[in-house]
Image (cartoon, coloured by chain):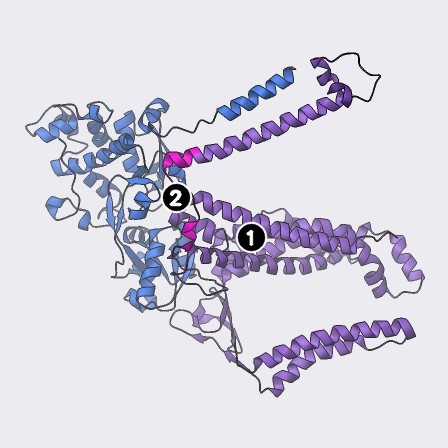
Chain colours: A blue, B purple
C-alpha cells in the first residue's frame, strides 16, 4: 500500500501544483535573488562587447548596469544572457530575462500584440545600407538585382521588403542570424550589400580591416527607435527601468556626471537635482527603491552623454555623432520628463 | 474482484484489501492504472501551465495570423510568393523547401551510401581503406559542422559572380550559387509530355506481354531496348517533330548578379551535400552489414548452379541483403529529414526558418508556430516510415 500512497500523493501534488511562475513582482524577485537578468545582443562593436576580462560592456549593457546599480547597488550583479533577433522576445516573455537592452526597435505590434513594454528610447536610429566602394553604388535605389544580407526576425527585414517593393526593384535576401555572421557573409561576397540600423552598420564597418573601402548609402529607409523593454503587465518594474533611463538622460541635461555626482548629492540650489539625487523629498520610495537610487546609477555608469562618448561617440572607433540623439536643449530628441 | 482474477491457487476463503496487492494480476492492473494516472496528471499539468501562462501574459491563442500578410521575402521559393503573401503561404514555401532538401538528400545519400558500402567490401586494400577512412571521418563529426564547413567552402572559395566559372557561357558557378539556362516551354510542348507518358505506359505493357510470352513459350524478347526506345526515344522524336518547343533563357551578367536562368543557391547546395555526405557514411555501414549478413553459401550455391556473378548479385545476394538493410535505412531517411532543420544555421529557408522562425518572431505566436512545425515534422516522418514499412513488407521473406 505504501507504493500506492506514494503514487497517489505524487499525482495529487502534480495535479494541484499548477503554480504558474509569478511575474507580477519582478522587482521583489530581483531584490531577493540579488541579481538582475538582462538580455543583450550577441555582440555589436560599441553597443555590446566583452572586454579583456570577459565582462560585457557597451552602450546597451550600460543600461543594465545602471538599473542594477539603482536596484541592487552593484553594477556587477547583472547576469547577461545573449539573445539573437529571433530569441529575444521569447527569452523576455518566458521570464528568462527581466529586461532586454539590445538594439530593439519600438514598434506598435511589439508593444501591444507581443505583450511587451518599451520603457523609452536610448538611441534614435534608422535603417541604412552599406556596400563596398568598388561596387560603385551611391544610392539604395540602384540596387536592382543585388544580394542583400539581412538579420532575420528584425524590423529591418520587413522594412527591406517594403522598400524594394515600393520602389519596384528586385533583390535576393540572404538571411542570417547574428551581426557576426552578416559580417562574414558580407566580407566573403555572398551578398553585395548589408543592411541594418545605421548605428550597427557604422559599428560593423569600424571593425573591418579597411573601413574606408565601404560606404554607407545616403538613404535611411525607416525610423528605428531603439530602447530597453520589459514584460507587459508589471508596471512597477517597468517604472524602475523607465526612470533609471530617464535619470541618465536628465543627468546629462542637469550637468551631473559620475565625477561630480557625489558633491552634488550633498545638496544644490537646483531643486530637481536635489529630488533626483535624494537630498530633497523621497522619489525612490515611490518606485520601491531607496533615496540614493539615481545617485548610484549615475555614479556607476555616468550620464547619457558620458555613456555615449565612452562606447560609440566621435572619439571611439565607432565614431557616431550625437545627431538627433543630442539633448533637446541642443536640438536633439532626448527629453526626459521632469523629476517631480 | 481479487478472487475472480486469481486463477493460480485454490479459491480464497475471504476478501481482504491486502490480497489485491499480493495477487499478481490485480497488482498488474493497479500499477498500470497508477502509471496512466501519473501520465495524465503530467499532461494536465503541462496543458494548464501553458493555458495559465498565456492568460497571465494576456496573449490570445489562435491561428488567424496565418492569413495576415507576412511582409518578408524568401530567396528560394518553389511556388509564387512575395512579401504580400500570407504567413500561411510562407509556411507552405518552407514546407516545400524542406521536402525538396529531404527528397534530394535521400536520393544522393542512398546512391553514395550504396557505392561506399560496396567499396568498403572491396578486396582491393587501398579502395577498402579509403572508404573506411572516409566513413570514420564523416560519421564522427557533427552534421552541423559539416553544413557550416561546406557552406564556408562554397561561399569563401568560389569566385564572385563577375568572375564566375562558366561552361560554354551557359552554366555558371559562383559564390551566389549554380546558375543555368531556364527552359521556357512553348505551347506545343504538351505533345512531348504526352509522348513521354505514352512511352512509359507502352514500355510497361510490352514488358508484361514479353514476360507472359517467355513463361508460355520460353522465347525472350528485347525488353530493355524496346523500353529504352519508347521511354527515351519517343519523347525525343516528338520533340524534334514539333520543332523544338523549348526555349532556353540563358543567364546574363547583370550589375550585381547573373540575371535570368535558374539559380541553385549555395545554401541549398551546402545543405544538400553536407546532409548527403554525412548520412551516406551511415548508409554505407548499413549496406555493408546487410551484404555481410547474407551467408557466403548463398552466393557459392548460386555460382555452382552456373549463374553469372552479376545475376548472383542481383537475384540472390541483394534481395536477401535488402531485408537487413531496409529497417535501419528508414531511420537514416528520417534523420536526413529531421537534420534538414539545421538549415537555419546557413540561412536556407526551410520550415523552421519560415513559419518556425521569421513568422514566429514577427507575430509573436511561439506556441502556434511551434505546434505547426512539430506536427509537420511528425507528419513527414510518419509518412516516410509508412512508405518504407510498405516496401519492407514487399521485400520481406515470403513464407509459403
Left-right relation of A321 to B245: left
Q: Chain of mark 2?
A: A
Label 1 crowd bin: few (<14), some (14–19), many (20+), radius 10 Å:
many
Q: Chain of mark 1?
A: B
Residue at the spot x=59%, y=50% of the render?
A: B379
Q: Position of residue B297 (x, y in %)?
A: 90, 53
* Residue B143 showing in the rendered view: no
Image quadrant containing the C terminus of chain A: top left
Q: Nearer the viewer, residue A322 or B385?
A: B385
Q: Which residues are magenta?
A: B52-69
* Residue B234 showing in the rendered view: yes
Q: Nearer the viewer, residue A257 or B20?
A: B20
Q: Is residue A241 magenta?
A: no
Label 2 crowd bin: few (<14), some (14–19), many (20+), radius 10 Å:
some
Q: Nearer the viewer, residue A203 or B245?
A: B245
Q: Is residue A25 above or below residue A94?
A: above
The picture quadrant where one finds residue B131 is bottom right
Residue pointed to by mark 2: A42
Q: How many marks?
A: 2
Please tell me if label 2 and label 1 are on a single chain. Answer: no
Q: Nearer the viewer, residue B308 or A222?
A: A222
Left-right relation of B159 to A116: right
Of tags 2 and 1, the one toward the viewer is 1
Q: Is residue B64 magenta?
A: yes
Residue pointed to by mark 1: B340
Left-right relation of B155 to A284: right
Image quadrant containing the N terminus of chain A: top right
Left-right relation of A54 to B46: left
Amino acid at each position: 500500500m505504501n507504493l500506492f500512497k506514494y503514487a497517489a500523493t505524487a499525482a495529487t501534488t502534480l495535479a494541484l501544483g499548477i503554480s504558474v511562475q509569478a511575474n507580477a513582482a519582478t522587482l521583489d524577485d530581483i531584490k531577493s535573488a540579488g541579481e538582475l537578468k538582462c538580455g543583450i545582443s550577441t555582440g555589436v562593436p560599441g553597443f555590446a562587447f566583452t572586454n579583456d576580462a570577459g565582462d560585457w560592456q557597451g552602450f546597451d549593457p550600460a543600461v543594465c548596469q545602471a538599473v542594477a546599480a539603482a536596484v541592487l547597488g552593484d553594477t556587477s550583479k547583472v547576469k547577461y544572457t545573449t539573445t539573437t533577433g529571433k530569441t529575444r522576445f521569447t527569452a523576455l516573455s518566458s521570464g528568462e530575462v527581466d529586461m532586454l537592452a539590445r538594439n530593439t526597435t519600438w514598434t506598435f505590434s511589439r508593444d501591444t500584440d507581443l505583450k511587451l513594454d518599451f520603457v523609452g528610447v536610448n538611441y534614435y536610429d534608422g535603417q541604412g545600407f552599406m556596400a563596398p566602394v568598388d561596387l560603385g553604388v551611391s544610392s539604395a535605389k540602384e540596387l536592382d538585382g543585388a544580394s542583400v544580407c539581412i538579420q532575420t526576425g528584425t524590423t529591418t527585414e520587413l522594412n527591406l521588403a517594403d522598400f524594394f517593393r515600393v520602389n519596384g526593384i528586385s533583390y535576393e535576401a540572404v538571411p542570417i542570424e547574428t551581426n557576426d555572421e552578416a559580417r562574414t557573409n558580407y566580407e566573403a561576397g555572398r551578398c553585395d550589400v548589408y543592411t541594418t540600423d545605421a548605428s550597427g552598420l557604422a559599428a560593423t564597418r569600424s571593425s573591418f580591416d579597411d573601413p574606408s573601402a565601404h560606404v554607407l548609402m545616403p538613404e535611411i529607409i525607416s525610423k528605428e527607435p531603439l530602447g530597453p523593454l520589459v514584460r507587459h503587465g508589471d508596471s512597477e518594474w517597468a517604472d524602475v527601468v523607465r526612470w533609471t533611463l530617464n535619470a541618465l538622460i536628465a543627468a546629462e541635461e542637469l550637468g551631473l556626471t559620475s565625477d561630480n555626482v557625489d558633491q552634488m548629492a550633498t545638496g544644490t540650489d537646483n531643486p530637481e537635482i536635489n529630488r533626483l539625487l535624494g537630498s530633497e523629498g523621497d522619489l525612490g520610495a515611490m518606485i520601491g527603491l531607496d533615496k540614493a537610487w539615481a545617485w548610484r546609477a549615475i555614479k556607476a555608469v555616468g550620464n547619457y552623454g558620458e555613456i555615449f562618448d565612452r562606447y560609440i561617440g566621435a572619439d571611439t572607433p565607432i565614431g557616431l555623432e550625437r545627431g538627433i540623439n543630442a539633448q533637446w536643449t541642443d536640438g536633439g530628441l532626448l527629453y526626459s520628463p521632469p523629476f517631480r | 474482484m481479487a478472487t475472480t482474477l486469481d486463477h493460480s491457487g485454490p479459491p480464497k476463503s475471504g476478501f481482504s484489501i491486502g490480497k489485491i496487492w499480493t495477487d499478481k494480476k490485480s497488482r498488474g492492473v493497479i500499477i498500470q492504472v497508477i502509471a496512466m494516472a501519473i501520465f495524465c496528471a503530467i499532461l494536465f499539468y503541462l496543458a494548464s501551465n501553458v493555458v495559465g501562462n498565456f492568460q497571465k501574459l494576456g496573449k490570445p491563442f489562435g491561428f488567424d495570423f496565418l492569413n495576415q500578410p507576412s511582409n518578408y521575402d524568401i530567396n528560394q521559393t518553389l511556388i509564387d510568393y512575395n512579401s504580400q503573401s500570407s504567413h500561411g503561404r510562407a509556411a507552405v514555401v518552407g514546407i516545400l523547401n524542406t521536402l525538396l532538401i529531404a527528397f534530394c538528400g535521400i536520393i544522393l545519400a542512398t546512391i553514395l551510401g550504396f557505392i561506399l558500402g560496396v567499396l568498403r567490401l572491396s578486396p582491393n586494400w587501398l579502395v577498402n581503406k579509403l572508404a573506411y577512412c572516409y566513413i570514420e571521418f564523416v560519421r564522427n563529426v557533427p552534421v552541423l559542422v559539416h553544413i557550416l564547413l561546406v557552406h564556408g567552402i562554397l561561399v569563401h572559395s568560389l569566385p564572385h559572380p563577375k568572375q564566375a566559372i562558366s561552361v560554354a557561357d551557359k552554366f555558371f558557378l559562383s559564390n551566389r550559387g549554380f546558375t543555368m539556362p531556364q527552359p521556357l516551354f512553348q505551347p506545343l510542348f504538351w505533345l512531348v509530355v504526352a509522348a513521354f507518358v505514352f512511352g512509359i505506359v507502352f514500355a510497361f505493357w510490352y514488358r508484361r506481354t514479353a514476360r507472359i510470352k517467355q513463361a508460355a513459350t520460353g522465347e525472350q524478347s528485347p525488353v530493355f531496348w524496346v523500353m529504352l526506345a519508347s521511354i527515351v526515344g519517343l519523347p525525343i522524336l516528338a520533340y524534334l517533330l514539333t520543332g523544338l518547343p523549348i526555349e532556353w533563357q540563358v543567364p546574363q551578367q547583370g550589375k550585381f548578379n547573373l540575371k535570368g536562368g535558374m539559380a541553385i543557391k549555395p545554401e541549398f547546395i551546402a545543405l544538400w551535400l553536407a546532409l548527403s555526405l554525412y548520412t551516406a557514411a551511415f548508409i554505407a555501414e548499413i549496406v555493408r552489414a546487410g551484404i555481410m549478413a547474407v551467408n557466403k553459401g548463398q552466393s557459392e550455391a548460386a555460382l555452382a548452379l552456373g549463374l553469372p556473378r552479376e545475376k548472383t548479385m542481383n537475384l540472390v545476394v541483394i534481395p536477401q541483403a535488402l531485408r537487413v538493410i531496409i529497417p535501419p535505412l528508414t531511420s537514416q531517411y528520417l534523420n536526413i529529414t529531421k537534420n534538414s532543420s539545421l538549415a537555419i544555421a546557413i540561412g536556407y529557408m526551410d520550415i523552421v526558418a519560415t513559419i518556425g522562425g521569421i513568422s514566429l518572431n514577427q507575430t509573436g505566436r511561439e506556441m502556434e508556430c511551434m505546434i505547426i512545425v512539430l506536427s509537420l515534422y511528425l507528419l513527414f516522418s510518419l509518412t516516410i516510415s509508412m512508405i518504407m514499412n510498405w516496401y519492407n513488407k514487399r521485400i520481406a521473406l515470403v513464407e509459403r
